[in-house]
């Protein structure tokens, strides 16, 4: 399994931007589909976006489409989440996750992901 560590969270005003990073250990990062999930207090973990091994296919939740961008740098073993036009409802703990199965596109099912980071808090004030 790959080990994941997120960074880049913080407090931002509505309309602002943040860039999250997820650094992976190990030499097999490029064999994993990667995703970002988020979990707000009292709510279930929610799929935000995902990206395939080579970065050729990305999938977004409707709630973030057009505002968030996922990308990856396999040479740096890192996946990124650029978040623009942030809203108070984006407030949550954001987790990155790794899926080692062979899939044509990232799955939205949390149970399919075998490795998770500890999460980074994103708070958007109104």
Image (cartoon, rainbow, N blue to C red):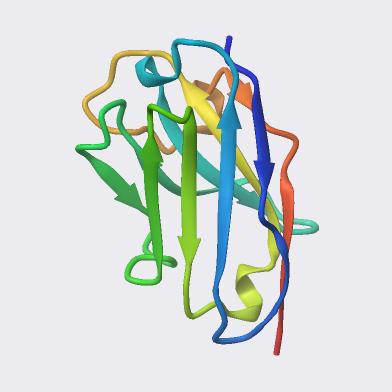
* Left or right placement of residue 5 versus residue 84 in this view: right
Count of marks overlaid on the render: 0
Q: Residue furthest right?
A: 41
The relative height of residue 104 versus residue 80 in the rendered view (above or below) is above
The relative height of residue 28 versus residue 12 in the rendered view (above or below) is above
Q: Residue furthest bottom?
A: 126
Residue 110 in the image: state x and y as whole percent.
Answer: 54, 32
Instruction: Locate the C terminus and report the quarter of the image it occupies.
Output: bottom right
Residue 72 falls in which quadrant of the image? top left
Instruction: Locate the N terminus and report the quarter of the image it occupies.
Output: top right
- The residue lying at 48 percent from left, 27 percent from top is 77
Residue 16 in the image: state x and y as whole percent.
Answer: 57, 82
The relative height of residue 24 versus residue 114 in the rendered view (above or below) is below
- The residue lying at 30 percent from left, 31 percent from top is 52
- The residue lying at 47 percent from left, 39 percent from top is 79
- The residue lying at 48 percent from left, 80 percent from top is 85
* Left or right placement of residue 55 versus residue 33 in this view: left
Residue 56 falls in which quadrant of the image? top left
Residue 25 in the image: state x and y as whole percent.
Answer: 60, 18
* Left or right placement of residue 58 versus residue 91 in this view: left
Between residue 60 and residue 82, name the one nearer to us. 82
The relative height of residue 8 versus residue 96 in the rendered view (above or below) is below
Between residue 20 and residue 65, name the one nearer to us. 20
Residue 82 in the image: state x and y as whole percent.
Answer: 47, 61
């Amino acid at each position: 399994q790959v080990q994941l560590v997120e960074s880049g969270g913080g407090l931002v005003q509505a309309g602002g931007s943040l860039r999250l990073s997820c650094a992976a250990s190990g030499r097999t990062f490029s064999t994993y589909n990667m995703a970002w999930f988020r979990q707000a207090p009292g709510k279930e973990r929610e799929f935000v976006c995902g990206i395939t091994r080579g970065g050729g296919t990305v999938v977004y939740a409707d709630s973030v489409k057009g505002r968030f961008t996922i990308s990856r740098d396999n040479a740096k073993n890192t996946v990124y989440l650029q978040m623009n036009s942030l809203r108070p409802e984006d407030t949550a703990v954001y987790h990155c996750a790794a899926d080692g199965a062979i899939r044509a596109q990232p799955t939205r099912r949390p149970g399919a992901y075998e490795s998770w980071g500890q999460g980074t808090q994103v708070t958007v004030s109104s």
